[in-house]
Amino acid sequence: MDASKRKLLALNAAKARLLAVQMVHGAASGHPGGSLSCLDVLTTLYFDVMNVDVNDPRKEDRDRFVMSKGHCSPAVYPVLALKGFFPVEDLKMFRRIDGHMSGHVEMNHVKGVDMSTGSLGQGISVAVGMALAGKQNKKDYRVYSILGDGEIAEGQVWEAFMSAAKYGLDNLCACIDVNGLQIDGRTCDVMPSEPLDKKLEAFGWHVIKVDGHNYDEISAAYAEAAATKGKPTMILAKTVKGKGVSFMEDNAGWHGKAPNDEQMAQAKAELEAAIKELEG
């Protein structure tokens, strides 16, 4: 990846992080930690990988994306806004009773969202169905999904993984956001899932491990996934929960909590400094 592309991705991710924290603060509710951790992956998908059309969000041959950990709408909505699906100003309607942007990813009122999610485990199942439909209909579109490493304690997730392998869904590329934390603490304490790579390989998936904050590695992994035939691909992205905001980083307490005014001021200062450096 050339330096200009890398800089653009980093800038969009930094802007999305600021918008995400502002949304959660404005609503006094939401899930900042896991949203911030997956934003480099999500930004790479929408600004470097996926075939989407902001002027035709339901285009039949578009690539599809499903945020399986649906509470991370503060990651999805800002990326869609920055991509141009709707005005950034609309993000102020997040979690408002008179608004149209619910706390979990919602498809009926938010342009660019391919699937409403929230019940953990169901998103990846829908992504498998989308990919299977694409195969049966002989379509060229690809399907992408992001799961949380806490989410994969759900049994339905592994049923979906088995189905994807059975049907050879090489048009499906999922990513597990391995930030090591969930609402109740460290995933290794709540419900250990490692070794994820060996488990997924045993389930018939092609597995790629990356630094989830390294754009070159993320982009290369998606290119490798597109070139892999006969089986689905899983990207295991090692990330930092709360990435970009110092007091949120690697802190399970920020899974589903809004910052107060003082904390918001600090987060804003840190993220604006990152944006300014990238724009310089």
Image (cartoon, rainbow, N blue to C red):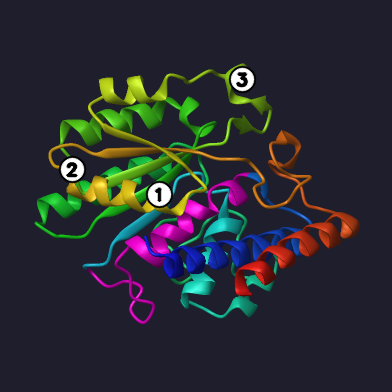
Left or right, residue 29 beside residue 204: right
Q: Is 89 above or below relative to 175?
A: below
Q: Which numbered disc flags the more N-terminal residue, 3 or 2? A: 3
Mark 1 surroundings within 10 Å by alpha-carbon count, few (fewer than 14), some (14 through 19), many (20 or more): many
- Secondary structure under the numbered disc 2 in the rendered image: loop
Q: Are marks 1 and 3 in contact (CB under 8 Å)?
A: no
Q: Which numbered disc flags the more N-terminal residue, 1 or 3? A: 3
Q: Are marks 2 and 1 in contact (CB under 8 Å)?
A: no
Residue occupying image coordinates x 44% and y 36%: 121
Task: Point out the frontmost of discs 2 and 1.
Answer: 1
Q: What residue did someone put label 1 on?
A: 218
Mark 2 surroundings within 10 Å by alpha-carbon count, few (fewer than 14), some (14 through 19), many (20 or more): some
Mark 3 surroundings within 10 Å by alpha-carbon count, few (fewer than 14), some (14 through 19), many (20 or more): some
Viewer-closest of 273 and 103: 273
- Amino acid type, callout 2: Thr
Q: Over which residues does the magenta segment extend?
A: 34-60
Residue occupying image coordinates x 63% and y 32%: 182
Q: Which numbered disc flags the more N-terminal residue, 2 or 1? A: 1
Q: What residue did someone put label 3 on?
A: 190
- Amino acid type, callout 3: Val
Q: Is 280 above or below relative to 126?
A: below
Q: Which disc number belongs to residue 228?
A: 2
Asked if residue 265 is among those painted magenta in the image, a careful observer would answer no
Where does the C terminus fall, quadrant-wise? bottom right
Viewer-closest of 144 and 273: 273
Viewer-closest of 58 and 196: 196
